[in-house]
Image: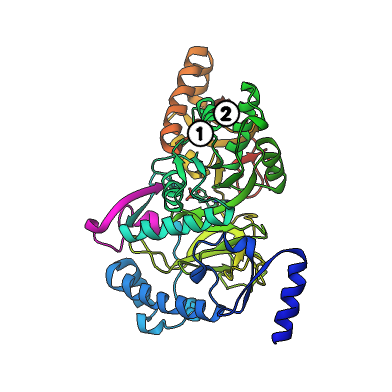
Amino acid sequence: MANVILSLTFFCSQRKKVYFCTERKLLINSNYKKMIWNPNKECMSRDEMSALQGKRLHKIVKYVYHNVPFYRHKLQEMDITPDDIQTIEDIQKLPFTTKKDLRDNYPFGLQAAPPSEIIRIHASSGTTGNPTIVGYTRKDIGVWSECMARCLTAYGVTRDDIFSVAYGYGLFTGGLGAHNGVEMVGASVVPASTGNTEKHARLIRDLGITGIACTPSYALYLAETMDRMGIKKDDIKLRVGAFGAEPWTEKMREEIEERLGLKGFNIYGLSEVMGPSVSYECQAQHGSHINEDHFYPEIINPVTLEPLPVGQQGELVFTTLTKEGMPVLRYRTRDLCSLLPGQCECGRTSVRMSAIHGRSDDMLIIRGINVFPSQVESVVLSMKEFAPRYMLIVDRVNNLDTLQVQVELRQEYFTSTFDTPAAIDELEKKLAGKLKSVLSIAAKVKLKAPNTIERSQGKSAHVIDNRNIK
Ligand code: DLL
């Protein structure tokens, strides 16, 4: 064994200096080692990790059983008690949780902690009018900040960085979630949020901002704005980008890196589970490491709901192992991806997930905002002038997502409306206003004559997505 270690050390030292961690029997590249926030957790042996996950799973099941009637009833129906859950493998006995469950229990039905313990509330879009409400205790915010610090450290962010957070601040988890992590690392945070891109571009140049967190499409829009303003890559000091909240491709990564002169890393998360920092890329950039001491991942077949083996693509499911505010058991994310086999060269032992390849539902992400066609339908149906025939046309113009909603007028309103341009304009504005308040993004409305939106033969199709981001 000693020989193997020696020769491995010798072999690796030909290329890069290697750090050998005897307790955990791990080879950690010394350059990467500095980029691990919490080696005790991120580099735990697989056996230790499974034992920890099993212990935490038992605790969380007991906690929701006693504090969330929804889970207690579900477990009782299945004849399961918390004592039946002792190891992480027992997770397969537990029921799934869906977005519909969250919606049906709006607003606080799935909250496990008493209201006095909740210190922050975020919300994300639901499939109809009601958003999903997620409350966090002080401990949850601490865990979230630590998970975020793990991501940023893996990207190479240190206290010497000036880091701009250009995810939306507000109900969306992106802004404040990333913000807390930057503060925990000790870098200087610039809470730029979204919008006012020219001012942001000037700040990036004038303050010497070195890191940025935003959606990948916003990064491209920022690059375009800088071009227009005459700010060149050499005028700025950006070197690290944390991009996520929407699917993106390797081609987008190349373009962002080339135009902004930085290295771009993936960050994944969802409000129901925590927010950004559920998983993150390291310097090896071969999949995103899951913070699995807090969020236990499974991949299932979205049709049969059977668990799938590592390496196979299916729907990602998460169980929160430590969350107090709103824990979720086996939450179906609807994101399609796979878990990657083997250990990463960075020294972390945590399991990695592939990029998201698609969704098992019809949710769209437009300018980082989750949009369900059913939300548009509920607005269209709430107005007597419209037939239940509509189409969402999503595009990307100058690196900004655009949404057009086409909708058919009912025959009885058609002639009177289409006779006067002012009436068309007024009705389009009325619908656009209602859509904006439900979707939280602006949509351009186009009224159509009856029977002009194409009918599909099978399941009705309501979306044309021209962005080509798969
Ligand atoms: O988007 C949280 C987040 C903020 C993640 C900032 C990363 C950065 P939600 O609004 O609840 O939360 O949307 C969650 O967005 O189920 C995925 O479909 C998608 N998504 C998030 N990150 C990525 C990513 C935030 N890196 C939904 N790649 C998820 C692809 C992503 N899709």
Q: Position of residue 134 (x, y in %)?
A: 36, 53
- Give the amino acid at mark 1: Ala
Magenta segment includes 103: yes
Q: Label 1 belongs to which residue? A: 387
Residue at x-position 65% and y-position 55%: 357
For the question of whether residue 420 can be seen, the reply is: no
Tell me the crowding category of disc 2: few under 14, some 14 to 19, or many 20 or more residues within 10 angstroms, Cα based: some
Which span of residues is magenta-colored? 100-124
Q: Is residue 82 above or below residue 123?
A: below
Q: Which mark is residue 450?
A: 2
Q: Is residue 432 above or below residue 277?
A: above
Q: Position of residue 406 (x, y in %)?
A: 57, 31
- State the residue lying farthest toward the bottom: 1
Residue at x-position 66% and y-position 26%: 227
Q: Position of residue 361 (x, y in %)?
A: 56, 53
Secondary-structure class at tag 2: loop
Q: Nearer the viewer, residue 73 or 16?
A: 16
Image-based side of 38 in relation to 140, left or right: right
